Amino acid sequence: MKKITRRRSLALGILGVSGLSDPLLKGAQPGRNLPLSTVFKGKSTYHRIVAKAIKEGWRKRPIHQRMILFARELHGTPYVNYTLEIDDHIESPSANFEGLDCWTFFEITLGLSRMIMRGQSSYSQEDLLREIRWTRYRGGSCSGNYLERIHYLAEWFFENEARGNVTDITRELGYAERISGRKISEMTILWKHYRYLRENPELREPMKKWEAYVAKFPVYYIPKSKVAVIEPKLQDGDIIGIVTGGHGGFCSHVGLIIRTNDKVTRFMHASRNYKKVVIDKSISGYLNSFRSHAGIMVARPQEVGYTVTDQAQYQKNLKRLRG
C-alpha cells in the first residue's frame, strides 16, 4: 500500500482575522451576531454527546477514530436541507443537531473531533461554534457577511488544507485526473433557493466573481471506475466529496468513510433519499448507483496540532495549492 504523506503545519490556535482580504468582502460589519437560540439547535443532544465523549476519553483516540465515534452519535438524525440559511442578512456560524444536511453532517463531526482535543472539563455551545467558524469560512473568520462563507466543497478542501485542518490525499491514492472546463454557477443560477441571495440581490454579482475564482482551482478526482481499487487505502473519517459529471459545481454531495465490522468501506452521509444520516453501501457501490456521480475527492482530517495560524503562511500555502 502506498504511504499517505502528511504535510506538517505550523502551530495550534485560531486565526483571529480574515484570511482572504478581497474587495468582494466590502460591507462586512465586525461584531454582527445572531442570538444563540438562532444559531444553535439541539442543545441537549450536543451536551449528551459531549458528556459521553468526555466520560469515555475520546480525546485519547486519533482523529480518524474520533470522527467515527462522533459520526455514529449523529446516525439517524433527520435530513433537513438548507440548514445554513438561518437569517435574511447576517451570516453567522451555526450548528443544528435536530436536522442535518450533507455539509453540516461532516462539518459538525469534524468540529466535535477537533473541539474535544482542547482538553477542557466541559464544553459550551460556543466552543463548537468556534470550530465551525474556523472550518466554514475563508481564513477562519466570519464578520457577518455571507460572502465570507465557503460555498463550494472543492474550495473547502483547498482552504482547509492551507490552514492545516485536512490534507487532500486524492492524488496520492492513485488514478487521479484533473477536472477541466467546469462551469461553476450553482449559487447564482439557483439563487432563489438561498435565503441570503434571495433577500439581498446585491450579493449575486459578487457571488459570480467568487464562482469564477473557484472555477480556476486545480481540482483532481478519482473516477468511479477506479474507486473500488483504492478503497483499501481509505480510512475511517476520511471526508469524501462526490464529484458530479455535470456543470454547476465540482461536487454534488459529501460524506465520510466508515469501515464496518464486515470490513466493507462504506459511505456515511446525510441522505436526502433516506431522509436521515445513514451508513450506506461501499463507497464504490454508492457511486455506481447514480449515473450523475463521476468519482470522488478525498480529504483526510489532521490533528489540531497541524493547524496553521500564521496568516502569511496560510496565504503562502493557499497560493501554492492553487498552482
Image: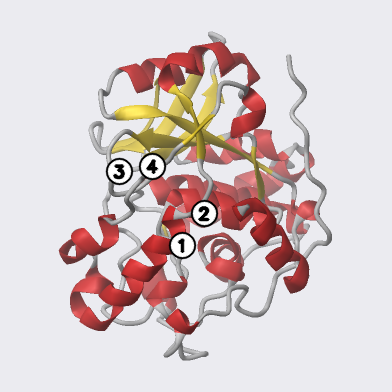
- Cα–Cα span, label 1 and label 4: 13 Å
Q: Which residue is more in the foreground, 119 or 45?
A: 119
> Is 248 rendered above or below residue 276?
below
Question: Of the residues under marks 4 and 3, which one precedes in the sequence?
Answer: 3
Asked whether, in this view, residue 192 is left or right of residue 60, the answer is left
Residue at the top extreme, as displayed: 262
Q: Establish if 6 lies above or below 304.
A: above
Q: Tell me where residue 277 appears, x and y as whole percent.
A: 37, 36
Q: CA distance from mark 4 to mark 3?
A: 22 Å
Front-most of residues 19 and 77: 19
Q: CA distance from mark 2 to mark 3?
A: 24 Å
Label whose residue precedes the other's in the sequence (1 or 3): 3
Q: Marks 1/3: CA distance?
A: 24 Å
The x, y position of residue 317, in whole percent, is 71, 58
Residue at image location 67% in from the left, 29% down from the top: 172
Residue with the mark numbered 4:
251
Q: Which mark is residue 78?
A: 3
